Amino acid sequence: MHEWALADAVARYVLELLKENNASRLERIIIRLGVLQSIDKEVFMFSLRELFRQYNIEYSDEAIVLIDEEALFRCRRCGYTWSLNDLEVDEAVREAIHFIPEVVHSYFTCPRCGSRDFEVVKGRGLTIGEVVVK
Amino acid sequence: MHEWALADAVARYVLELLKENNASRLERIIIRLGVLQSIDKEVFMFSLRELFRQYNIEYSDEAIVLIDEEALFRCRRCGYTWSLNDLEVDEAVREAIHFIPEVVHSYFTCPRCGSRDFEVVKGRGLTIGEVVVK
Amino acid sequence: MTNIELDPRIIAIRESLKDIGNTIVIMSSKGGVGKTLISSLMALSLSLKGSSVGLLDLDITNPSCHLVLGINISSIKPIEEKGIIPPIIHGIKFLSIVFYSEDKPLSLRGSEIDYAIKELLAITRWGKTSYLIVDSPPGISDEALDILSYLIDPRIILVTTPSPLSIKSIERMIVFLKDSGEKIIGLIENMANKPTNPINKICRDYNIQYLGNIPFDKYIDNCIGDINCIKTTLFYRSIEGIINKIT
Amino acid sequence: MTNIELDPRIIAIRESLKDIGNTIVIMSSKGGVGKTLISSLMALSLSLKGSSVGLLDLDITNPSCHLVLGINISSIKPIEEKGIIPPIIHGIKFLSIVFYSEDKPLSLRGSEIDYAIKELLAITRWGKTSYLIVDSPPGISDEALDILSYLIDPRIILVTTPSPLSIKSIERMIVFLKDSGEKIIGLIENMANKPTNPINKICRDYNIQYLGNIPFDKYIDNCIGDINCIKTTLFYRSIEGIINKIT
Ligand SMILES: Nc1ncnc2c1ncn2[C@@H]1O[C@H](COP(=O)(O)OP(=O)(O)O)[C@@H](O)[C@H]1O
Ligand SMILES: Nc1ncnc2c1ncn2[C@@H]1O[C@H](COP(=O)(O)OP(=O)(O)O)[C@@H](O)[C@H]1O
Ligand SMILES: [Mg+2]
Ligand SMILES: [Mg+2]
Ligand SMILES: [Mg+2]
Ligand SMILES: [Mg+2]
Ligand code: NI
Ligand code: NI
Ligand SMILES: [Zn+2]
Ligand SMILES: [Zn+2]
């Protein structure tokens, strides 16, 4: 479980934002969780709240919004598009990918042309959609 | 002068677009000319019209819109932003850059921190803004 | 046709490469195995045998074919005429980004390498050319991916040494190439005084032709930059043997 | 502070590297000059001398430090605990992307390499570490640029061989590093039985310390993967000499 590490990155990020903007309260943060990182939402939410507490970050309960994001791939060679659901992924591979999503390029090739030159259009991992501080 | 080569790329591109869309006439094409490629607008326009004629591409005189784009750089190390006007560029260097704009990274460094890890935010070269075919 | 392929430069590239007979790419994900020496000397040998040959250095951030062939990049430049025409040196149509970066450092992010390669390929007028030899950098990143995407029917010559570090590396590259159905002409074993068992085994396991070995040649470094000297070396004779096998 | 720096991972990286004493990066834009052997053996030598040391392989598309040290990547893995904790092997905290790519081919565009490096750096918990040795790939692209941007106060050891092709390459790298004011510890001349004039001259011209030469060692390849064998080599003794100079 590295949800803690990811949550800590977000918490420190919020802390810097507050400082920079001379703000005292987190009003809203939208966090997208790309499926490749297999983030356990409950563990992540728990870690984030715990860290906000440790760093004395004020926020309301509805401030944190987590949104799931499906994984979508597109081949740069042939243009084919596919999603993670189209693939069978065994547990050990899912485990490897959840640390460093880029290693998908080691385990999968384009289902149409076999190329490894494809891009992860979305669903890579944690990204921050919007933050409001006051 | 490699305006001809650049114009030819655009003309062939329009040709493919027309074919793909089963269209017969170019209604509008907006072409941005980034200053790093030092494209001579008159030569470019002349070449493009000549090539459109050779490839039997129908278009009205107002269809082709050329827009100049200044060059803007941003340092990935320190965040500093600057423009080409801030630099002295001698003729031989301008000549090299006009072929392969990426070689700016050989001749310039960030004016603030000296890093070569900067991005060309805009003004790299020819890009197509909008095309309408009918 | 997808949008990706509708970059005007991609269309221009197809056009500018259309009169090239054979595109031969020298590859290995390991550095220092001899790719640059091999590609430069192959171009030289093909040219001296009377073929029309081009040499394209796509090691964008560390180009060095011009050093091997002793090409003075400040006095010789491509001609600008409806694009650029590569200068002919020792009978070879030669193109490298050093004509524009002038042997200064060129540090580029991957996306910038991709842009530079597209631009180079799109504006160059090779004309009728029987063989285009392409030198490539180590690693499997933008340069290798671009070579496989943008060149027309590239055929690959792999290079390795018998060192255990090179062997693992070449195996990974073979899997990578086979997965997308690339055409591999064969493999050269460099710095090996005779064919070795591990490399022969790799060729058998992956069904790849063993093109030949190049012995360790302690004189080669002294000849870099001087083609008359190069032509007298054991290295060059080994390349000639390999050329005879594949043409 | 600009927006670029406000990637949460960049903030996490600063935090995760804060207990590292010295970050030493082994660099050269030329491949095959010995970067991987040197970084692995330096880590080993520092560890055997009692320092707490980490080894980070940032040659993302061609990792090979694990091969040098004979690390079995399928039986040993980082522990996942509030991030990842590098396994300790031969006393070295070792981290490489092979723990996740499993020695399969890993072809990545530059932007993907940048992402992978950011992720690796952000989630790793090195703990108190006196020396972090970083191996890097050839070329001057995303890996090198990321190393200089994300690591804290990196200090660089350059590697070259006396070959004319390596010399041009190392000169370009030196100019690149000096322009942005990077700290260069010094230069190692590999595969040279004694210090050579051209490399000494480069050190003088650019005011760089000549750290020592490593002779050509024909036994080194046979010892790859076996640290007891490695410790008996001339290569390893040369590394020990260099370590004594810089610590
Ligand atoms: N057969 C050989 N005998 C002796 N030295 C060689 C041989 N092949 C390569 N080398 C040495 O290896 C160095 C790297 O060769 P190079 O062609 O630049 O490799 P790459 O392009 O794969 O990085 C050369 O400068 C030369 O010193
Ligand atoms: N001092 C040396 N003596 C003999 N061979 C060497 C020496 N240094 C490097 N090599 C050879 O060069 C190869 C490449 O070394 P490596 O450390 O992988 O270089 P890099 O990481 O710079 O690509 C090794 O497999 C080994 O065969
Ligand atoms: Mg090379
Ligand atoms: Mg192809
Ligand atoms: Mg290496
Ligand atoms: Mg720094
Ligand atoms: Ni986890
Ligand atoms: Ni021009
Ligand atoms: Zn595909
Ligand atoms: Zn800067």
Image (cartoon, coloured by chain):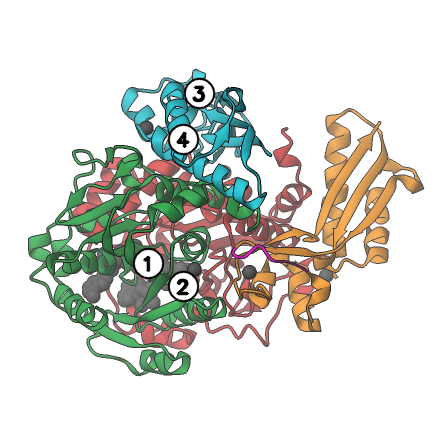
Chain colours: A orange, B cyan, C green, D red
Frontmost of labels 2 and 1 is 2
Residue at mark 1 shares a chain with residue at mark 4: no
- Front in this rendered view, residue D224 or A29: A29
- Where does the magenta region start and end? A77-82
| Residue neighbourhood size for the residue with mark 2, other residues' Cα within 10 Å, grouped as few (<14), some (14–19), many (≥20) | many
Q: Nearer the viewer, mark 4 or mark 2?
A: 4
Q: Are marks 2 and 1 in contact (CB under 8 Å)?
A: no
Q: Which amino acid, mark 1?
A: Gly
State the residue at coordinates (52%, 34%). B77
Residue in view at x 63 percent, y 28 percent: D1
Q: Residues within 10 Å of mark 1 (few under 14, many from 20)?
A: some
C22, B100: nearer the viewer: C22
Based on the picture, tell me whether residue B101 belongs to the magenta stretch.
Answer: no
Label 1 vs label 4: CA separation? 72 Å
CB under 8 Å between discs 4 and 3:
no
Q: Are marks 2 and 1 on the same chain?
A: yes
N-term-proximal mark, 2 vs 1: 2
In three-dimensional space, the C-alpha distance between marks 4 and 3, rounded to whole angstroms, equals 36 Å
**Residue D241 image label:** 1
The residue labelled by disc 2 is D41
Mark pair 4, 2: CA separation: 66 Å
Q: Categorize mark 3 by other alpha carbons within 10 Å: few (<14), some (14-19), many (20+).
A: some
Image quarter where the C terminus of chain C lies is: bottom left
Q: Secondary structure at mark 2?
A: helix
Instruction: Give the image location of residue A13, x and y in percent.
Output: 73, 39
Chain for disc number 2: D
Q: Which residue is mark 4?
A: B53
Q: Of the residues shown, which amino acid type is indicated by label 3?
A: Leu
Q: Residue furthest right?
A: A61
Q: Earlier in the sequence, mark 4 or mark 3?
A: 4
